[in-house]
Amino acid sequence: MTAFILRRLGTLVPMLLAVTLLVFALMSLAPGDFLTPVKAQRDINPALIAELQKSFGLDRPWYEQYLRWLGNILRLDFGYSWTYKVPVAELIAQRAPATILLSLCSLALAWGLAIPLAVLAAARPGGWIDKLTSGAAYFALAIPEFFLALLAVWFAAQTGWFPIGGLTSLDHDFLPFGARMLDIAWHLVLPTLVLGLGGVAGTLRVLRANVLDVLRAEYVTTARAKGLPEKIVLFRHVLRNALNPLLSTVGYAFAGLLSGSLLVENVMNYPGLGRLVYEAFIREDQFVVLGSVMVGCTLLVIGNLISDLALAWSDPRVRYGR
Amino acid sequence: MVADLFQSLLRRPAGLVSAILLILLYGAAALAPFLAPTIPSAQDLNRTYHPPTTLVWQEGRLCVRLYRLVDPSTATYEPLPGQAAPLRWFSEGPPYKLFGLITSKTHLVTVESPAALYLLGSDATGRDVFTRLLYGAGISLGIGIVGVFLTSLLGLTIGGLAGYLGGWADSLAMRLTEFLMAVPGLYLLLALRAALSSRFPSDATFLLIVVILSALGWAGTARVVRGLVLSLRERPFILATNILGQRPTVILFRHLLPNTFSYLVVAATLSVPGYILGEAALSFLGLGIQEPSSSWGLMLGQAQDIKIFMLNFWWLLTPGAAIILTVIAFNLLGDALRDAVDPRFRLPGR
């Protein structure tokens, strides 16, 4: 098992190299750099700009810059954000937990809602639960996340029931611990709903098909013949087997969540990784982009790994390593 | 084969309704300049955030009510009681070019100057939302079709070659697709957009977006085509062509790939929404279609003002409804086509 985990983490290295190289090359193809706004100001001494360019290594060809950046990474130096004037590592350490929290909440929502609904829908194919959930899932998959986010902001503004954006209230720092947690939970409700809805629909459709497949298995007939109550047949015998294929797709779901959170965070003013990446891209704040992309990809690989491990735990037929 | 497809589509009401809806949408997009009461760049700074105008039946004609600005700070308008202007059918308005060729001034419907026809309200600079929605449809829907065409071509070629050649070409292509599928798509989208923007003139943004979306979207198609080619390759009719001594290119393009066609039609229909949503997301972030052009994503991006949410200018969110409608129609049509093409794809229990 340890060997398997190590091997999987080993694939992270070529992937990170490939992604950062690609992003680095693409960003240096783009015109201008993070000093362009500075150069546009008339009252700045050209000598200072030349010095800055030299100190950031901008006068070198891009592959040399990349190798330098890579060397710094090995020394755990993620570089310095030009626009935020803080080290990139600090910036990401601030933002990444918010995105992880949001993604996990959305995943929990997707599974928590989709599992019972899918089992109930598949228990009576064509019944009213099935028709209702299938229709709702069709609709939910068609709504763009950013539009849903807009609707959520509109809803919050019109009713005043939920905060319009952000992760904390103004007086957050002065609240006692319990109230602070409640405050964050309150701010998380709408973003989680927005980001999780597509996941609910997707999970529901896949799981429903899986449950219908498993229901035809002979051990289900055996369980019923033994006289087990239908509830136990469905949730203990069918569900566990139907969940297995789904577990292996959690990693890909996580990729979707990272992309989706980029849009949702921007609309809902949520202080996460997605908004950081977007703003850094716009300002060509190279090191912030690279750092965030690396963290995003690492999260993905870890997500995939966890889903594989969960699969091995839940399905005794799956064995990794020797 | 196409006739068969059409026949079985006729037997599925959901698919048929979607097909008709999509034909209507594309028709409306093509005829947008004629159908729209004005042109998308026509501003009216005295009528910002105008609510949708009500149509009334008066003196035997369809009329539009006249409005008065009550409070400019909150953009409150109030209809003038009993006053209305008749709609003019097939009358002259601002000049436009139909299909980029025919110059004309005739619009389906306009109104006399002091009155204004805002079927879906107006935006922050008093432009007609309905007109912009129609013009935006051309771009949003067009990107879907062109993007899917490019992707299918790319996926077919790469997947076909990978499956047929096998060996290192296969593993190279598959590693590439895995990479594309494993990286969060929007990150790459942003990077590509930043890199390519200077290579395209600003009026070719449409092309730029299509190229970016296709460059990221071919992976799924290529993988499935490869799988199909791998299994087809062992079938007797391909072995026969091998024995006949056909050239590999002929075998691939004449015999193998046409057999993946029915899958491709279904996959293409089901992936059009991805392109429409992708364009909308890019334009929404301000990285896609730029002013003065209009697209559904761009319109939604401009509706991100807190004023709009607080004062309930709901009509500015109608492009979202248009996107949802189109995506649902494409999905329903794709599902119906899939059932028609291959019953094995059908989900159990349906």
Image (cartoon, rainbow, N blue to C red):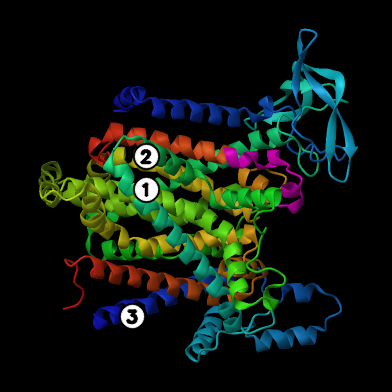
Badge 2 crowding class, 10 Å Cα cut-off, few under 14, some 14 to 19, many 20 or more, is some
Q: Are marks 1 and 3 on the same chain?
A: yes
Whether residue B224 is visible: yes
Q: Identify the image quadrant of residue A305.
A: bottom left
What residue sits right under mark 2 in the picture? A129
Q: Amino acid at mark 1?
A: Leu
Q: Quadrant of the N terminus of chain A?
A: bottom left
Q: Amino acid at mark 3?
A: Gly
Residue in the picture at 16% in, 51% down = A228
Marks 1/2 in contact by CB < 8 Å: the verdict is: yes
Q: Amino acid at mark 2?
A: Ile
The chain to which mark 1 is attached is A
What residue sits right under mark 1 in the picture? A117
Q: Which mark is residue A10?
A: 3
User: What is the CA distance from the residue labelled 1 to the residue labelled 2?
Assistant: 8 Å
Residue in the picture at 39% in, 66% down = B179
Badge 1 crowding class, 10 Å Cα cut-off, few under 14, some 14 to 19, many 20 or more, is some
